[in-house]
Image: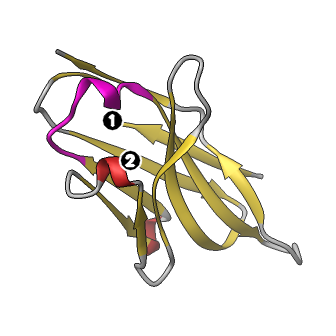
Amino acid sequence: QVQLVESGGGLVQTGGSLRLSCAASGSIFSINTMGWYRQSPGKERDLVADITTSGGTNYADSVKGRFTITRDNAKNTVYLQMNSLKPEDTAVYYCNADVKPHFQWSSYNYWGQGTQVTVSS
């Protein structure tokens, strides 16, 4: 079994910063792409940013230049540094990872439980 546990959400004022963390644990052989998604009430869950094992990154246009995704492969952890936050960044942020468990032939997609980020105006 594989678990993703997020931390670091909270309430911040416009222009502030937050850092999200997501640690993967369990029967992990390897992790491919890790990423962050977000979902606001009544909207779909959208990609915020993702990062490959080798460090290649991809960002949503709305967060380019403000958010930075990084990962620590030794710790199976992915981070999202969020700067210059805006009210429209308010959402539940979900961690996602493509994981190959031990003793499995295939990789599987896992989600964290989500962490609330609220940006006040």
| Badge 2 amino acid | Ser
Q: Which residue is rendered at x = 28% and y = 57% of the image?
A: 64
> In the figure, 15 relative to 69: above or below?
above
Which residue, given by chain and number where applicable, does mark 2 sit on?
A: 21
Is 16 inside the magenta-drawn segment? no
Image location of residue 103, percent across then percent down: 86, 74
Q: Is residue 2 left or right of residue 64?
A: right
- Looking at the rendered structure, which numbered label has been put on residue 8? 1
Q: Could you tell me which secondary element the residue under label 1 belongs to?
A: loop
Image location of residue 5, percent across then percent down: 53, 42
**Tally of marks:** 2
Q: Which residue is rendered at x = 85% and y = 73% of the image?
A: 106
> In the figure, 44 relative to 62: above or below?
above
Foreground: 70 or 86? Answer: 86
**Start-end of magenta stretch:** 82-91
| Badge 1 amino acid | Gly
Quadrant, the C terminus = top left
